Amino acid sequence: MDSIISNPVLTLVIPCYNEEEVLPETISRLTAILEELTESQLISKHSKMLFVDDGSRDQTWDIIASYNLKNPFVSGLKLAKNAGHQNALLSGLMEAKKNSDCVISVDADLQDDLNAIREFIIKFNEGNDIVYGVRKSRTTDTFFKRSTAQGFYRLMSKMGVNIVYNHADYRLMSKRVLQELSNFKEVNLFLRGLVPLIGYKSTEVYYDRHERFAGESKYPLKKMLAFAFDGITSFSVTPIRLISAVGFGMFGISLLIAAYTLISKFLGTTVWGWSSLMLSIWFIGGLQLVALGLIGEYIGKIYKEVKQRPKYIIETILESQSTLDTENTKKVNNSEREAVAVQ
Ligand code: UDP
Ligand code: MG
């Protein structure tokens, strides 16, 4: 970070989808934390929570609206219809960016340990732009959730996608990180993959993951699979490369089969027509896969172009003294001109 902000304005962004059962508790716990942090002067008193109602069909929005009247920390944003966790989160982040120095995204269900917020802020005040919340253990998740989620993280890293192991969407981002994030225009949003691409100074904070305070997970298996698939296909061309690899493999096998077929033919153990059929099947099969893989490579390139991700992100610019001097002269000249105009 260029300059370390003392007393930063913090906004907590909380996406909510049918969370009426947990909201009152979440609000009271987060209020206590904000009060404590403002009192100890770690954050500005203009800090707040921003609840994003992701098209809930229950009382979620009414609860947010009623707390908005009585709790000075509570603000809300209502999406017209369910846009999905990642999009809801992004809408909140972009709204919060306008007047916050840093933003922490946290789930409504109190699964993430809220005490980590204090550490997030301390790390931010030490000069980190991104602070990732990383789960120490997953003992409170069901066996199924735990194994599928960990399998997913491993698969992602095998596919060459840079994500932080055991980190979900509990993280702090500075204003300039959000600014850079807004330059990623892609529609298939996978924030966990995007944030590490930004590359500013980051650190991790470890915390215990609790069970959901109330209600059910809003990520049923179907949504979870779609999310994982989105993550992989938005960040990796490895699946396409696999097609080419299998194609070359089949091509290799077809050479072996060719030798086997020809030997069998000359030994006279084959029926008429078998050898040519065998050869064509393997050879053409391999050829087709190689061709598909090749086309896939181009499609992968097109996909990358279409996403129009930023090609680089600037960390700092040091102006040379001479440029600064010219700017000062310009300013002086301008003020002289103004002075003349006033006369
Ligand atoms: N959520 C959302 N829109 C959705 C699904 C979920 O805003 O379409 C919110 C949800 O209210 C919660 C967070 O995203 O605050 C994470 O969802 P959940 O806790 O159900 O996921 P899990 O922890 O089971 O992976
Ligand atoms: Mg949850």
Image: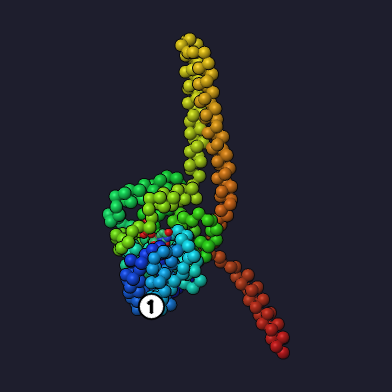
Determine whether 175 is above or below 230 in the image: below
Report which quarter residue 9 is drawn in. bottom left
Question: Which residue position holds label 1?
Answer: 71
- The percent coordinates of residue 52 (x first, y second) are 44, 67
- The percent coordinates of residue 236 (x first, y second) are 49, 47
Element carrying mark 1: loop
- Residue type at numbered disc 1: Asn
Q: Nearer the viewer, residue 142 or 202?
A: 142
Q: Nearer the viewer, residue 332 or 101?
A: 101
- The percent coordinates of residue 165 (x first, y second) are 38, 53
Question: Residue reaching furthest top?
Answer: 268
Pointer 1: residues within 10 angstroms few (<14), some, or many (20+)?
A: some
Q: Residue at x 54, y 27 (%)?
A: 284
Q: Residue at x 50, y 21 (%)?
A: 278
Question: Residue reaching furthest bottom?
Answer: 343
Q: Is mark 1 within 8 Å of ligand 1?
A: no
- The percent coordinates of residue 159 (x first, y second) are 45, 45
Q: Residue at x 50, y 50 (%)?
A: 234
Q: How many marks?
A: 1
Tell me which colouring the rendered structure shows.
Answer: rainbow
- Quarter of the figure that contains the C terminus: bottom right
Q: Judge left or right: residue 120 versus residue 316.
A: left
- Residue 86 visible here: no
Q: Residue at x 52, y 30 (%)?
A: 286
Q: Nearer the viewer, residue 276 or 303?
A: 276
- Residue 158 visible here: yes
